[in-house]
Image (tube, rainbow, N blue to C red):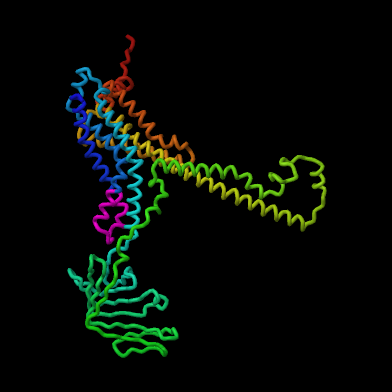
Amino acid sequence: MKKLDKLVLKSFWGPFLITLSVVVFIFLMRIMISYIDEFVSKDVGLSEYARLFSYFAMSTIPIALPLAMLLSSLMAFGNLGEFFELTALKSAGISVVRVMVPLFVIAILVSIFSFFFNDRVVPWANLKGYSLLYDIKTTKATLKIKEGIFYNDLPGYSIKVDKKVPNSNTMLGMIIYKHDNRSFERGNTQVILADSGKMYTINNNGYLVIELFHGNNYQEVQNAAGDRSMAYISNGPTNSQANANFMRNGFDEYKLVVSMESFGLKRTDEDMFKYHEYMKNIDDLTQTTDSLRKDYNRTRENLIPNSQQYYSYKFRVDSPFPTKLTAGKWVDSLMTRSVSDSTKGVILSNAKSAAASMRSFAKSNAEYLENKRKEGNRYELEKLHKYTQAFSCFVMFLIGAPLGAIIKKGGFGVPVLVSIIFFILLYVLTIQGDKYVKDGLLNVMIGAWLANSILFLIGLYFVERARKDSRIFEKDVYQMHWNRLKKRFFTPRTVVEPA
């Protein structure tokens, strides 16, 4: 490796790694902001969150690589141009294209890495990440009781607290309705009132302990006949209806131990998520796409044979009449035959019913074919994006390296601005191409490669401009052209009067 190649690579790797880390972090923050409501107050450990973010970080690497390649190559050549190193190389007879050769090789290697990473690692990371995210979203929130409001998320209990003592687990004026599964039909049959109490967890948050002080336990007992009694709670004696029992027990200290199993994280079977296109590699996507296409073609081919059941004679294979109706004696005889009003009503009713059935058949098949077409296009788009995202790394290099040589500005100022513009252009063109494909306006291949095709041509144009040492981004060039235009069109002409 020559010193020139080492110089270019040394100025490239630092910005590349920093940019890749920053972009991955930005995408993770976007995911966190999107699901912040699902993360808050969940009884999930830090290890689960670390696993979740690591999965999503791996899934965002193919998206972050093109932007990292664009910004780092732009900064590398911008620094070379800003400190006149690129000018010295040109004066020594070395072309810009020769200087780009080491980054050209790196861009190809990064594209290959992006392809295999996107095909093998990303589907696995998406499957793990989205299944874990679903488990976190469905996990119950931690036990948070507010003053004066019944808390009903604890299975089998409804708890209300009048006041919570600050900086303590002590609560005043507690009301607890206790019910099991069989008592739901009869409502709340047991209530516990206490002047104060404490709540805390034991065994690694496995169980909740509720200690109550100075209160009463009121419980309605069902009689043998199954009749329900009414309970009246007061400071005096307690009454009950006939044929029913009602008990009241006073206590100085009462302890409840409740399992917190329902608040823990429960893992869902990952096979439930494997149907999605984000969880499949190229082989799986190809197999699914072929199955959908075959189903689509099979349904189209069976449309005419299946529609024959809605016709009395025309289009029917077993009909004795000709497929194409032509004039003849048999038609004349039918036209001259008298038909009663009742017969006409039956004929019209049958014709109307057959027409309605045919319309329903055609509508349902049209919707089915449209759904199959869109689903097939979606899977094929995802398969092609495995290739387009890898190739976009090379396209971003073709844009970034010559732009850096033209702009001659390093650092994170102008390069970041230019990189964001082209990355947004890549994103918008990709989304627009996907939309056209899903709407049936473009072929899947054209829509998937639309963004890369346009930006590839732009990259070739910038390479050509860099070879000729163009100054298209220097304002004095445009000021010079503007002054020429002003002199040509806006300078007043001197009129020479005759003597």
Residue 421, how many percent across, how many down?
A: 31, 36
Horizontal side of 81 relative to 338 (left or right) equals: left
What residue span does the magenta drawing correspond to? Answer: 30-54
Q: Nearer the viewer, residue 375 or 264?
A: 264
Residue sitting at 31 percent across and 90 percent down? 237
Task: Where is residue 352? Give x, y as percent.
Answer: 68, 53
Q: What residue appears at the point 63 percent right and 50 percent down from the top-left corner? A: 358
**Type of secondary structure dominating the magenta stretch:** helix
Q: Between residues 250 and 320, which one lies in front from this camera angle?
A: 320
Left/right of residue 326 with respect to residue 196 in the rendered view: right
Residue occupying image coordinates x 33% and y 26%: 460
Q: Residue furthest top?
A: 499
Out of 147 and 212, give the one closest to the viewer: 212
Residue 474 seen from this side? no
Q: Can you say whether 294 is above or below 473 in the image? A: below
**Residue 439 covered by magenta stretch:** no
* Residue 42 on the magenta segment: yes
Q: Is residue 330 above or below residue 87?
A: below
Q: Is residue 319 in sight in this rendering?
A: yes
